Amino acid sequence: DAGVTQSPTHLIKTRGQQVTLRCSPKSGHDTVSWYQQALGQGPQFIFQYYEEEERQRGNFPDRFSGHQFPNYSSELNVNALLLGDSALYLCASSLLARGGTEAFFGQGTRLTVV
Amino acid sequence: SQQGEEDPQALSIQEGENATMNCSYKTSINNLQWYRQNSGRGLVHLILIRSNEREKHSGRLRVTLDTSKKSSSLLITASRAADTASYFCATDEFLNRDDKIIFGKGTRLHILP
């Protein structure tokens, strides 16, 4: 049973470019959340997708957008990249349930903006 | 914004000793979770404790939760070199009743040989 998989593992982009990161959730999970983790910091919540719609959003600009597909996989898009967008981007999958369940994380995509 | 704050920020102990990390949070919660992260890689889920639970064990891990003080502690007994990692507490907000989880800044644990 594959866990959460993210691609690519590393990426280097130039300031102003656009990037798309991908995530496949753990089998049986229907909810995907994205996090940004700067060096030495805890993960910051970007947004969460369920049933192909954005359910919740953190304090991130509209340059950050996403999508969830019918097979529950998800993409994170970032437009007009800034140097400050350099970070580890983590995807987490879970099964939506009131009361909360543990989220399973992928290994992340290391994005470097130069 | 970050809900949880771990304490200490960094901790170095000898192999075999016990390591204790603390987490404080601000709002009422449904659950509190602890995660481990090795060298900037993905987070590994360690344990989830619900708001109506006070203590939970998993192998060498012991987690306590004090909702009156809005705090939790993670105890790792008989530490090993492989326990060297960053540890994060993560909470969800009770009023929201969704499973968006908010992380603290983490405790960096270093086990000395």
Image: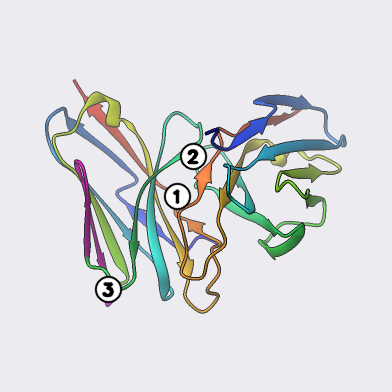
- Circle 3 residue: B69
Q: Residue at x 59, y 50 (%)?
A: A29
Q: Is residue B34 above or below residue B66?
A: above
Q: Residues within 10 Å of mark 2 (few under 14, many from 20)?
A: few
What is the distance, in whole Å, between disc 3 and disc 1 at their CAs? 19 Å
Badge 1 marks a residue whose secondary structure is loop
State which chain disc 2 sits on.
Answer: A
Residue B58 image point, x, y percent: 24, 47
Q: Is residue B60 magenta?
A: yes
Q: Quarter-wise, where is residue B107 in the image?
A: top left
Question: Looking at the rendered structure, which numbered label has been put on residue A40?
Answer: 2
Query: Where, quadrant-wise, is the C terminus of chain A in this rendering?
Result: top right
Residue B110 as seen in the image, left or right of residue B5: left
Q: Is residue B8 magenta?
A: no
What is the distance, in whole Å, between disc 2 and disc 3 at their CAs? 27 Å
**The disc labelled 1 sits on which kind of residue?**
Lys
Residue A84 image point, x, y percent: 70, 41
Q: Are marks 3 and 1 on the same chain?
A: yes
**The disc labelled 2 sits on which kind of residue?**
Gly
Q: Quarter-wise, where is residue A73 in the image?
A: top right
Question: Looking at the rendered structure, which numbered label has been put on residue B105?
Answer: 1
